[in-house]
Amino acid sequence: MPATLKVDVPGMKDLLDQCSNDERIEIARYLDRLTLGQRLKRFHSSMRRRAPAASDVTREVERVRAMRHR
């Protein structure tokens, strides 16, 4: 018998607060996979408008590194 669980964003945050760090990392990687296509499309679209400056690339690399090492 299928079940549906409806959780709003604050409820999801409360659930995540109860998870271990390893579980949070697993969930973060899952969410990365779910959203990668959309993020790549948005990035690609922004790159068509202008060539990235070296500082833009460095800033993005640092942002991604910081997200991955939380």
Image: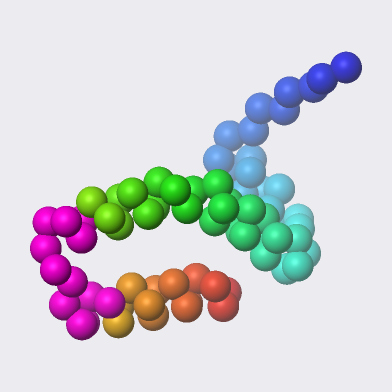
Image spot of residue 52 (x, y percent): 18, 71
Residue name at image x 44 percent, y 72 percent: 64
View extreme (top): residue: 1
* Along the line of sight, the residue nearer the viewer: 19 or 66: 66
Image spot of residue 23 (x, y percent): 75, 61
Image spot of residue 46 (x, y percent): 21, 56
- Magenta segment's dominant SS is helix
Where 37 falls versus 52 (above or below)?
above
Q: Quadrant of the N terminus?
A: top right
Q: Quadrant of the C terminus?
A: bottom right
Q: How many marks?
A: 0
Residue name at image x 72 percent, y 27 percent: 5
* Residue 5 inside the magenta-drawn segment: no
Where 6 falls versus 18 (above or below)?
above
> Which residues are the magenta region?
46-57
* Along the line of sight, the residue nearer the viewer: 65 or 70: 65
View extreme (right): residue: 1
* Residue 55 inside the magenta-drawn segment: yes
Q: Say whether residue 52 is left or right of residue 59.
A: left
Residue name at image x 40 percent, y 46 percent: 38
The colouring scheme, among rainbow, by chain, secondary structure or one colour, is: rainbow
Residue name at image x 79 percent, y 22 percent: 3
Dividing the picture into quadrants, the one containing residue 9 is: top right
* Along the line of sight, the residue nearer the viewer: 2 or 16: 2
